[in-house]
Image (cartoon, coloured by chain):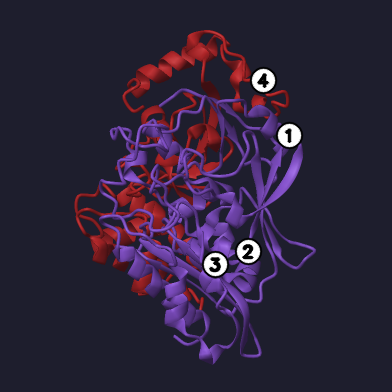
């Protein structure tokens, strides 16, 4: 899927289709009641299996005409040029693609973009800017929570959501071992961050950064 | 990936009507999208089940819980009622996958997950009766360290690797499914199939049927249950074996209970012979080792997975001791 077409070319091509009024009947929200089971009308080959999707990313809406197969990860990287979110395994195993959708961390590589109409997506670009880093970003810098940096955007998105989950009282399997009371111990952070792999092995400093950011140091 | 239409209906009946012959329902997509990327699943249409009103957890008149099929695994695990009345389910869910995956994965999708047998998930392997009926089984005489010790057939030795469904089985849950002719209720133990001659069929769902909920009866096992998962690393791995134990204890006396095993068979495995030993004892008189031995009654090893027969017994014994408060 990544090799379909370079983002800019593809986007301008699809944009011209949309401008010509093609594909309007394929809008995802126009398909909300297919009570008779009729598939969306298929016109020219170029319009088949596409849908208009409005992705709200870091507060800004983006209207896209997407192949229904495009993952949220590829939509962010190839269509919106938000390349902070990384493609690691592309199979939901490494966590490099972690983004926050309506406050919940998810693997963008297993999420079909067409399912995320109307959902607030936050990527690492939305967590801070140069000169005004978010608290987890700043903690990763202060604690040197990385080596090569490839997993870092996913670690930071995941860690940001992890701290919020903890503050809301969410359990991990480790919290069951101390009576169902969550505590942001090293063991709990490791369990709660188990969906983010770091092949450089910067885990010790990642855990330290997250304890700092959570105010548990 | 096979191209597909995407539909987003807003009622269960519209979703059922929209499916068509080559459609699939999609919830979180954590298993389905992965298998679509490798070409194992090739639906021509996806019907999104996230907007059907199936996202609630409610009390039932019987005093149990009804969990909508589209509730996320993380929301079930952290639901206050589930934590209080059926903590075994919370434990099992939190032992599964990663936080990111649990935020996507749904109750219904977890029930429908396919096996992780390498010969199934990788189409480079020519022989898999589940993926390509009649092609043979690569695992039976191949690499079968992770495969079944119970209920296997000559056609298939794959296992069902869910954590959620092992707990649901121990809690005597039912699956509520809806089709063109209305709803029916399927006991969890009847929901998944053994492979027999048709390993390509995982469940007893009929074409076009939609899972709408899982129902848990009231359980007296809340304080006497435990899920034990054994895996090759500390977190984020499928089970080698797992055991869910729910004991019905009244005044220190065992009135019954259920033991279920995971990752040992083509379905979550109800340890019926062991369960027959769980009534009419004082908790202090339980013969844990004998019950654990009975839980793997009929087990047969393949070349590489004999360790599972011993490991499953130890997992059962550990879960039993914890559930009985004798750890």
Q: Nearer the viewer, residue B29 or A183?
A: B29
The chain assigned the colour red in the figure is A
Determine the image quadrant of residue A43: top right
Q: Residue at x 45, y 82 (%)?
A: B288
> Would you say the residues marked 4 and 2 are in contact, meaning their CB atoms lie under 8 Å apart?
no
Q: Which residue position is annotated with label 4?
A: A38
Q: Residue at x 53, y 57 (%)?
A: B165
The chain assigned the colour purple in the figure is B
The answer as to whether the residues below labels 4 and 2 share one chain is: no
- Measured Cα–Cα span from mark 3 to mark 2: 13 Å
Whether residue A68 is situated above or below residue A84 in the rendered picture: above
> Would you say the residues marked 3 and 1 are in contact, meaning their CB atoms lie under 8 Å apart?
no
Q: Position of residue B170 (x, y in %)?
A: 57, 66
Whether residue A181 is situated above or below residue B171 in the rendered picture: below
Neighbour tally class for label 1: few under 14, some 14-19, many 20 plus, Cα within 10 Å: few
Neighbour tally class for label 4: few under 14, some 14-19, many 20 plus, Cα within 10 Å: some
The answer as to whether the residues below labels 4 and 3 share one chain is: no
């Amino acid at each position: 899927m990544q090799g379909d077409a370079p983002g800019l070319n593809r986007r301008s091509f699809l944009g011209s289709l949309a401008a010509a009024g093609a594909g309007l009947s394929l809008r995802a929200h126009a398909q909300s009641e297919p009570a008779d089971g009729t598939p969306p009308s298929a016109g020219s080959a170029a319009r088949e299996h596409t849908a208009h999707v409005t992705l709200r990313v870091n507060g800004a809406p983006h209207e896209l005409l997407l192949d229904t197969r495009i993952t949220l990860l590829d939509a962010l990287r190839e269509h919106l040029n938000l390349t902070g979110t990384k493609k690691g395994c592309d199979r939901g195993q490494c966590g490099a693609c972690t983004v926050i959708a309506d406050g919940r961390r998810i693997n963008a590589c297993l999420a079909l973009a067409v399912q995320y109409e109307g959902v607030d997506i936050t990527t690492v670009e939305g967590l801070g800017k140069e000169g005004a880093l978010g608290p987890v970003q700043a903690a990763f810098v202060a604690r040197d929570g990385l080596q090569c940096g490839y997993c870092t955007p996913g670690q930071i998105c995941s860690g940001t959501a992890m701290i919020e989950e903890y503050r809301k009282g969410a359990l991990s399997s480790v919290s069951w071992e101390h009576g169902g009371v969550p505590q942001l111990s090293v063991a709990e952070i490791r369990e709660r961050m188990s969906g983010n792999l770091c092949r450089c092995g910067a885990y010790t400093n990642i855990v330290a950064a997250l304890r700092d950011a959570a105010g548990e140091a | 990936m096979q191209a597909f239409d995407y539909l987003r209906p807003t009622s269960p009946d519209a979703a059922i009507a929209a499916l068509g012959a080559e459609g699939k329902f999609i919830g979180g997509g954590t298993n389905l999208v992965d298998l679509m990327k490798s070409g194992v699943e090739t639906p021509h249409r996806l019907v999104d089940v996230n907007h059907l009103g199936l996202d609630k957890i409610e009390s039932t008149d019987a005093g149990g819980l009804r969990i909508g099929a589209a509730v996320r695994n993380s929301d079930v695990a952290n639901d206050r009622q589930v934590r209080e009345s059926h903590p075994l389910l919370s434990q099992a869910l939190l032992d599964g996958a990663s936080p990111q995956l649990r935020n996507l994965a749904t109750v219904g999708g977890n029930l429908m997950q396919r096996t992780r047998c390498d010969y199934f998930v990788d189409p480079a392997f020519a022989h898999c009766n589940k993926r390509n009926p009649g092609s043979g089984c690569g695992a039976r005489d191949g690499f079968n360290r992770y495969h079944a010790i119970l209920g296997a057939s000559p056609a298939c030795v794959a296992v069902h690797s869910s954590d959620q469904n092992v707990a649901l089985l121990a809690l005597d849950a039912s699956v509520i499914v809806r089709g063109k002719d209305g709803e029916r209720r399927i006991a969890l133990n009847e929901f998944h199939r053994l492979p027999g001659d048709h390993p390509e069929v995982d469940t007893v769902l009929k074409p076009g049927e939609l899972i709408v909920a899982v129902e848990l009866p009231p359980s007296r096992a809340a304080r006497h249950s435990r899920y034990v998962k054994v895996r090759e690393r500390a977190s984020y791995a499928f089970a080698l074996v797992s055991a869910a134990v729910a004991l019905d204890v009244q005044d220190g006396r065992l009135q019954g209970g259920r033991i279920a095993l995971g990752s040992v068979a083509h379905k979550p495995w109800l340890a019926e012979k062991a369960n027959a030993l769980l009534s009419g004892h004082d908790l202090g008189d339980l013969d844990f080792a004998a019950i654990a031995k009975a839980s793997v009654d009929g087990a047969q090893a393949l070349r590489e997975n004999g360790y599972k027969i011993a490991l499953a017994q130890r997992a059962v014994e550990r879960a039993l001791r914890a559930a009985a408060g004798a750890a």
